[in-house]
Image: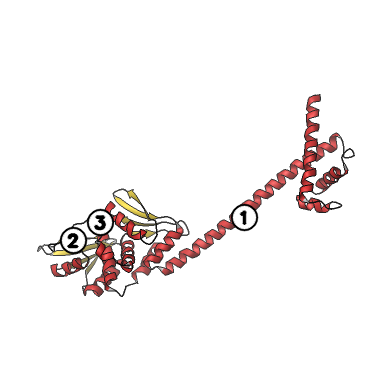
Amino acid sequence: MSFSSKVKEELSRQVSSARHCQIAEAAAIFRMCGRIAAGGDGRYQLALRIENQAVAKKFSALLKKSFGISPEAAVGGDAHTLAVCGSEDVLRVLRAMKLLDEQGYPEERKDLISSMVVQNSCCKRAFIRGAFLAGGSISNPEKSYHLEIVCANAEKAAQLQTLIGSFDIEAKTVLRKKYHVLYIKEGSQIVDMLGVMGANVALMELENVRILKEMRGTVNRKVNCETANINKTVSAAVEQMNDILYIRERIGFDKLPEGLEEVAVARLEQPDATLKELGCSLEPPVGKSGVNHRLRKLKELASALREDEEESL
């Protein structure tokens, strides 16, 4: 089972005890993947096409608890079809969802829902949960962080973006073919989103993945940094060895001041040693800055000898 399916399974098992939250969640599912249809006898019907079986069961449970209505269900292809028949039941549901106009007829609206349905914070959470169940998905956090909800038009996406934003979660939108897709790519924001919807098990799983990823990233950064430092140290030591060997070949160590001769011999004997290790091997011991100063003097001397050699050619 994909991570997205596991999240939906978890959310589908949750049914709020408050009727207003049940209505808000049912309204979100209906507005995301349902429509109002007229039956052959001219009576109203609610028709929904839901791809996920758990979500279809969740919508049926919400209508049963809130209105005592059991939708007619059928499976066709890869989708589950639900229908509420009978104008009286349909109008009861639409009235509770604030989807009737002033004359009591089904209202055509481009946005998702009336603000009356999502006045309370708990209803906003329920509505967002329903919208994700009906039109959302989330990627495997092991691979990437990406949560999205597909909306039919810009108005629906904008309203849902505002609802999510009320919980300090920044969702963005993009046009994909004919749909407006609301998405979140930051791991911490997706964690917050799962918390808003009530997917606490999935939240902990994602958090564990994020912690492991951050630990791996920290280790890799330290390894890369240490490798870079080692490479830098090795390169410097090679240059120092070349300079010292050139000085020995050209003038020998006898003409060097005692301190420079001592460091030169120590470097040849300990090509892999750090400056600190070189300093500790001297008599008396010398600090890193002192060793570095002497090696710099040797480098200057080698450069001067090379220049003299070039001029004499």
Do the residues under discs 1 and 3 have CB atoms within 8 angstroms? no
Q: Position of residue 175 (x, y in %)?
A: 32, 48
> Dot 1: within a 10 Å radius of its alpha carbon, few (fewer than 14), some, or many (20 or more) residues?
few
User: Reading the chain from its start, which is encountered first: label 3 or label 2?
Assistant: 2
**Quarter of the N terminus within the rendering:** bottom left
User: Reading the chain from its start, which is encountered first: label 1 or label 2?
Assistant: 2
Q: Position of residue 46 (x, y in %)?
A: 19, 64
Local secondary structure at mark 2: strand
> Dot 2: within a 10 Å radius of its alpha carbon, few (fewer than 14), some, or many (20 or more) residues?
some
Q: Nearer the viewer, mark 3 or mark 2?
A: 3
Local secondary structure at mark 3: loop
Q: CA distance from mark 3 to mark 2?
A: 15 Å
Q: Which residue is mark 3?
A: 111
Residue that protrudes farthest toward the left in the picture: 41
Q: What's the residue at 33%, 69% (across, down)?
A: 122
Q: Nearer the viewer, mark 1 or mark 3?
A: 3
Residue 230 visible in the picture? yes
Amino acid under disc 3: Asp
- Depth check, front residue: 18 or 272: 18
Q: Position of residue 194 (x, y in %)?
A: 40, 64
- Up the image or down, 70 lies above or below 158; here it is below
- Up the image or down, 226 lies above or below 64; here it is above
Amino acid under disc 2: Ile
Q: What's the residue at 16%, 64% (across, down)?
A: 45
Q: What's the residue at 12%, 64% (across, down)?
A: 43
Local secondary structure at mark 1: helix
Quarter of the image holding residue 9? bottom left
Q: Which residue is mark 2?
A: 36
Q: Is residue 14 left or right of residue 107?
A: right
Amino acid under disc 1: Lys
Q: Which residue is mark 1?
A: 222
Residue 153 visible in the picture? no
